[in-house]
Amino acid sequence: MLLQIPYFCFSTNYRTTTNPSANQTKYERLLEAYSSSGNHRSPTLDEWYYHFGKGEKSQEDKNHRNETQVVTKFANIDDESTEGQGNTKAEGAKPDKWTVLRVNQLWIWTLADKWLITATSCLLDDSHDTLAEEILRHLSKEADLGSSGSQSASVSEMVETIVDYCVRMYERDPKVSGQSSIGQTYSHYMNKLSRDETALFDEFRRQSEGYQHIETPKGSSRDSNQASSGLIRDDEIRTALRQAETLYSEIKDFRDEVNILSSAAHYQLAVQKRLPGNKVKTADLSASYVLEDLEKMDRVANRIELAVNATLSLQQSEISSRQATLATRQALQSTEQGKILMAFTFATLLFLPLSFLSSLFALDVSSFQQTPAWAFVVLFLVAVAVTVVVSVVAAKWNKAFPIIKARIPRLNKESSKPKSDSPEGDRVQKAAKLNSSGNNAASPHVEPHYWFRSRRRRKQQTNEC
């Protein structure tokens, strides 16, 4: 019988440089020596799932994913927290090696229920324990702590023990002291994302409260200060948006890696179900526990992602509101400036052509000296009065224009009414009224009456002649 099961393990990843380390050199030589045979590398979490090609863009994506694993970022957070204790690192310098999570493969052959043969992926270095060493240590601890009944009595039971040990690598502490297990590492990083989301929302709420206190007074001399303050607020909004985008990207990467871990756990669960002597319920299998834990983390990460999306939507709404407020404020300022410009325009058009300026400059010098003082007072008072009136009309033009527009039709109606001052005009109007009333009555006796009168008048004129 042949079984193949994936398992997780911590390992060290080295940066590709012109001067490779001794471990890299050994590893490459080993792969070259067995290039003709089936030699299985130790892929990272993303390499196991995505199967990157040999193209330049594919290799860049692979390197970026390997450098930004959750395990790597969580280890960097721990390094930053211990910098004050003597750990110094050049600012902006990238490390030559870092901790990553790998997905190795284990092959198990059973022969005649007597022999057990195992093989695993080729490890890069010995910075972490090999699977064989860990399983032997685990069996030794079981023998020391338990009775003879707790030990494997057959090959099938040994297979179950090895498979269960591979599955529980998810919750087992690694060789490096002070480092958490895989499940604890992802749980701690998820809690860090939740705290970042809360801090992001609190910062957005603080900025929103600050925006409400900023009001530009109309006609204030502090417009330039308010404008500079608005620019500062815009910079704060951009910074908050970048933080939200970064947090959203981290959540997407976290959920992507949790999905990869779930895919590997599904393989492990399928292997545990196919074991010959398996009598345990599916819900009681160790792989079921791993899947349940990963599903819980994915649900929590989904809620955090929705909260970040809501915060981003609120920030965008705040930006739209601020833009609308600024546009309204600029429109009001433009209106006020237009009124002032209109006042000066009317003052210029009406003040300059006035006759008192031409009279002032047309005066003879001798007569100018004999002009009484009150004339100059009247002259300049007229100019000031005209300027004030025009300025007031220009400032209140929006209110005065509808009133003037409403009065103009009334004046036109009154001017269009016929006015008669002479008795002859009254007689003409009365005749017109009688004529109109006669036409409206449309009597058949009217037309012969007027024809008879006109005929008699023609006879009288003939007799006179």
Image (tube, rainbow, N blue to C red):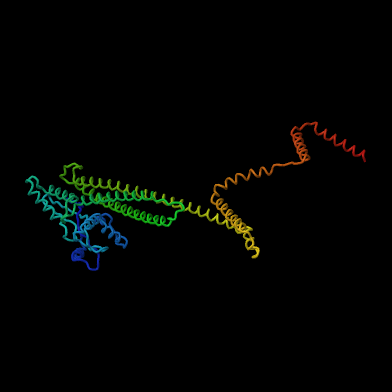
Q: Which residue does the image show at 52% across and 54% down from the upper left?
A: 340
Residue 28 placement (x, y as % from top left): 21, 64
Determine the residue located farthest toward the bottom in the rendered image: 18
Depth check: 459 or 337 in front?
A: 337
Residue 272: percent from left, percent from top: 19, 47
How many labels sit on residues?
0
| In this picture, residue 221 sits left or right of residue 144 | right
Q: Is residue 34 above or below residue 132?
A: below
| Residue 177 visible in the displayed image | yes
Q: Nearer the viewer, residue 459 or 191?
A: 459
Residue 40 visible to the viewer: no
Front residue of 116 and 89: 89
Q: Is residue 94 left or right of residue 175?
A: right
User: Which residue is pictured at 12% across the width and 55% down the height?
Assistant: 133
Percent position of residue 140, x then y: 9, 51
The image position of residue 184, as x and y in percent, is 20, 50
- Tell me where residue 92 sits by quadrant: bottom left
Which residue does the image show at 8% across and 45% down from the upper left?
149
In the rendered image, the quadrant that contains the C terminus is: top right
Residue at 35% x, 53% y is 241
Q: Is residue 328 left or right of residue 252?
A: right
Q: Is residue 163 above or below residue 58?
A: above
The quadrant holding residue 371 is bottom right
